[in-house]
Image (cartoon, grey):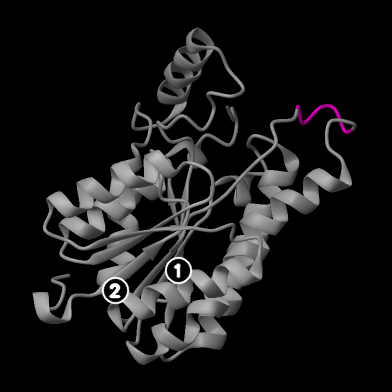
Amino acid sequence: MTPQSSTGRRVALVTGASSGIGAATACALAQAGCNVAINFNHNKSGAEEVAEICRSYAAAALVLQGDISNDKDCRAIAEAVTERWGRLDILINNAGMTRFADTGDLEALTAADFAEIFSVNVTGAYQMTRAATSALGQSRGSIVNISSHSGFSGIGSSMAYAASKGALNTLTLSLARSLAPDIRVNAVCPGFVDTDWMAPKLSADDLADFKRKSADIAPLNRIVLPEEVAEAALWFALGGRSITGQLLVIDAGTHLTVGAPL
């Protein structure tokens, strides 16, 4: 898992990298010796902070604004990366969105909600992959999709979100088949991760209670950290040369608690 020399560093592009799992993954890639392109949609200051951390590891960092639900933006992002470094070795499809909705209320989601969530979580990942395929193929690169355990369990922030992650899992398998042998495609599927993902839905006290319950129900009695998801993403990206089409659950064992889901 050692990147190439400084004169031929591997180049990674991480979408939605201004915070959370994306930020942790971008920083981990930089620490591992990769140059990193950091995509954001709205949070420019967060992306710039991530870039500074990457540079502290002696990596070059490029901050790129773009909405991956827009195919034109995806193509521009990929082009900017190859113009800067002349190559692309790793794509981390991390950008995602949700709508919080009570699964017991089928009126809580609209067709527009489904369309918007799928446009980012599924179509966006497809479009970004398509835009990056030529460069990734030249380097026999790797794609890692950041999915979710929701894609297996149907449990999550909303039915639309869970359905989109199920679709992303299927897309991972399809892409792994169609892009072989030149590009490997895998996905990591975390359960609840200790980020600010739930902050728009829960108060500080309720969020702390949710974290406690998440840890209590998990067989490993802990919740997953973003750095741990990043660790798995890096393993797929920089190692595992004979591994493609895999969906790796990272949830401290919560998927084992089928009789008492959170």
Q: Is residue 173 inside the magenta stretch? A: no
Element under label 2? loop
Residue drawn at 58 percent across, 17 percent down = 202
Query: Main SS of the magenta segment?
Result: loop
Q: Residue 195, image x and y in percent?
A: 42, 32
Residue 108 visible somewhere in the drawing:
yes
Bounds of the magenta segment: 102-106
Q: Residue 58, image x and y in percent?
A: 11, 58
Which residue, given by chain and number where applicable, does mark 1 sit on?
A: 186
Q: Quadrant of residue 109?
A: top right
Residue drawn at 44 percent across, 21 percent down = 211
Residue 19 visible somewhere in the drawing:
no
Q: Quadrant of residue 99?
A: top right
Q: Is residue 78 above or below residue 36?
A: below
Which residue, given by chain and number where applicable, does mark 2 sit on?
A: 240
What's under tag 2, amino acid-wise?
Gly
